[in-house]
């Protein structure tokens, strides 16, 4: 019988369409699924870390349905794998590739160290549809603009998703495991976890049924509805895609089928899935996108970087006095998610009206989003700030007041997420006060603040700074 294979799970918390798992099962020996809480995981923000814990619990249940289980260990990833190899006699370690700079560096080192020990260390495809190095411009470079990236990828074959293995061979005895209760991954969420949990859609089964219901009821109207934050017009799959609870090619094939069935919004949905690929393409080719201005001339821009400023605090707490902005920030704190239209508005307001560095906003999102994704978050922020490769120009400043008239004409969105301005307070708006830290000292019957920086004043200030820039 073959020696055991360690299946090292990371952001691929599923059994279906999982090339590394399928190959491990084919090898014929026992498969030992393991998740390692190392420094990279410990560095996650509060909400993503909590959401990871929920995802791991669901994954363990799925493995147990197949007579397997998820082994949890914490420590340095290489040393932990080496300990497990020693304990189990494993001859191979399989994992799904990830692309953020820190993970790539860690994984490259681990692969070579394991190979030196004659361990069969293999990484597999699965987090993306297209490996980032397989899309090339005509001159052999990488894409810096989305539309040509889309055109070059839209007709590519995307492999049919792999089935969930019928059984997962178990070892005769299991190595010891730590527990999620010990790990307390939700600790940094303060009071928020109980509230956010009501909105989260955890695990592979939930993701699959969400995709099914979106394809049945949502995708046809996706084009018309996707920009309306008060309408549930999008797939809401980002939290699942982020942790790999569903594979992008499963979503792609469902979207393709919907397109063949004549559902109007299906092509736009496919384009959005390719935006995610584009974010990874950019992060792979220019890893600096996660840490600094992609257009380096923006280093000379007089961004505010002081998070203690009252303006920045008001932005985080949803009390800038600009309704669209405050509603979005509260939606995020209450649900762990925010509508895409609102993400663009709150990001633009922070970077332009408040002239605050996009890194401050990116970091706050990283702490609050359960769909946090290193590539999409970095690209979204640099796009909004004007410092990214495929960016909205800095002088195009979203007006959060006219945007509200356009996308939330009847004030349903702001009415759902803001309590203070309204005598009849929506239950969602009230939940926000259950989620936030007590020291924020906010209550639903407070008076709603006047704008800290009005739409007009902020626009003038931002454009003035832009005119005076030194580049
Ligand atoms: P749908 O509209 O149903 O789209 C389907 C899928 O396509 C999404 O689940 C997502 O995986 C992908 N997608 C859609 N729009 C984008 C986009 N603009 N960029 C990249 N992928 C996209 N998305 C994240 O998943 N995680 C983040 O941390 C994140 N941070 C963002 C920060 C800012 C400032 C901005 C402007 C956008 C950010 N986005 C992020 C992108 C986008 O807002 C979300 O992917 C989207 O709101 C998720 O909702 P949905 O699943 O209903 O998407």
Image (cartoon, rainbow, N blue to C red):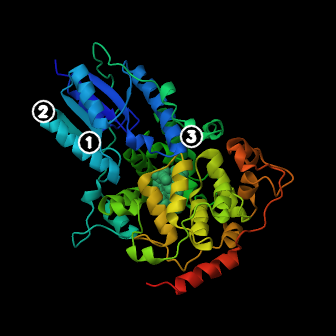
Where 294 falls versus 233 (above or below)? below
Q: Marks 1 and 2: in contact by CB < 8 Å?
A: no
Q: Which residue is mark 2?
A: 118
State left or right for residue 109 relative to residue 372. left
The image position of residue 252, as x and y in percent, is 40, 50
**Label 2 neighbour load within 10 Å: few <14, some 14-19, many 20+:** few
In the figure, residue 198 lies in which quadrant? top right
* Residue pointed to by mark 3: 188
Spatial CA distance of label 2 from label 1 is 19 Å
Q: Secondary structure at mark 1?
A: strand
Specify the label residue 276 is tagged with.
none
Residue 80 in the image: above or below residue 258: above
Residue at disc 1, CB closer than 8 Å to ligand 1: no
The mark lying in front, picked from 3 and 2, is: 3
The residue depicted at 32 percent of the width and 63 percent of the height is 286
Q: Residue at x 65, y 76 (%)?
A: 458
Quarter of the image where the N terminus is located: top left
On the image, which quarter does residue 32 sit in? top left
Q: Please state which of the two labelled residues, at mark 2 or mark 1, is closer to the viewer.
A: 2
Of residues 117 and 396, the one drawn nearer to the viewer in this rendering: 117
Question: In terms of sequence position, does the residue under pointer 3 or pointer 2 come before the other?
Answer: 2
* Position of residue 16 in the picture relative to residue 436 (left or right): left
Q: Earlier in the sequence, mark 3 or mark 1?
A: 1
- Single out the mark in the foreground, 3 or 1: 3
- Alpha carbons under labels 3 and 1: distance apart: 32 Å
Q: Farthest bottom residue?
A: 467
Q: Residue at x 47, y 57 (%)?
A: 377
Residue 33 lies, in percent from the top left, at 33, 27
Neighbourhood count class around disc 3 (C-alpha, 10 Å): few under 14, some 14–19, many 20 upward? some
Instruction: Give the numbered dot on residue 124.
Output: 1
């Amino acid at each position: 019988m073959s020696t055991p294979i360690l299946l090292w799970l990371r952001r691929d918390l599923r059994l279906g369409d999982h090339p590394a798992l399928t190959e491990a099962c084919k090898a014929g020996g026992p498969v030992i699924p393991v998740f390692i809480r190392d420094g990279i995981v410990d560095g996650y923000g509060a909400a993503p870390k909590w959401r990871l814990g929920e995802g791991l619990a669901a994954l363990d249940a799925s493995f147990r349905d197949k007579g397997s289980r998820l082994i949890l260990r914490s420590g340095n990833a290489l040393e932990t794998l080496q300990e497990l190899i020693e304990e189990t006699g494993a001859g191979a370690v399989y994992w799904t590739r990830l692309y953020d700079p820190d993970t790539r560096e860690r994984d490259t080192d681990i692969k070579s160290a394991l190979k030196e020990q004659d361990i069969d260390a293999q990484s597999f495809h699965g987090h993306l549809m297209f490996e980032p190095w397989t899309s090339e411009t005509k001159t052999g470079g990488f894409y810096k603009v989305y539309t040509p990236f889309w055109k070059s990828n839209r007709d590519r074959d995307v492999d049919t998703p792999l089935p969930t293995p019928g059984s997962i061979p178990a070892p005769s005895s299991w190595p010891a495991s730590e527990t999620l209760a010990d790990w307390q991954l939700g600790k940094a969420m303060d009071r928020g976890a109980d509230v956010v949990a009501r909105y989260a859609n955890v695990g592979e089964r939930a993701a699959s049924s969400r995709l099914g219901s979106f394809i049945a009821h949502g995708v046809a109207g996706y084009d018309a509805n996707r920009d309306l934050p008060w309408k549930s017009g999008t797939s809401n799959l980002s939290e699942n895609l982020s942790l790999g609870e569903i594979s992008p090619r499963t979503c792609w094939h469902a979207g393709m089928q919907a397109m063949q069935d004549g559902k109007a919004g299906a092509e736009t949905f496919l384009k959005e899935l390719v935006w995610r690929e584009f974010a990874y393409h950019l992060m792979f080719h220019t890893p600096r996108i996660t840490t600094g201005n992609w257009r380096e001339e923006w280093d000379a821009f007089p961004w505010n970087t002081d998070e203690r400023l009252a303006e920045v605090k008001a932005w985080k707490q949803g009390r800038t006095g600009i309704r669209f902005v405050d509603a979005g920030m509260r939606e995020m704190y209450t649900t762990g998610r925010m509508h895409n239209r609102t993400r663009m508005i709150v990001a633009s307001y922070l970077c332009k009206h408040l002239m605050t560095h996009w890194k401050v906003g990116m970091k706050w999102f990283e702490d609050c989003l359960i769909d946090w994704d290193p590539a999409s978050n970095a690209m979204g922020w640099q796009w909004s700030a004007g410092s990214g490769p495929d960016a909205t120009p800095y002088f195009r400043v979203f007006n959060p007041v006219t945007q509200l008239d356009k996308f939330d004409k009847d004030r349903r969105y702001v009415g759902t997420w803001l309590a203070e301005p309204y005598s009849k307070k929506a239950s969602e708006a009230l939940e926000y006060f259950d989620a936030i830290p007590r020291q924020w000292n906010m209550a639903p019957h407070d008076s709603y603040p006047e704008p800290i920086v009005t739409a007009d004043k902020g626009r003038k200030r931002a454009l003035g700074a832009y005119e005076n820039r030194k580049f």
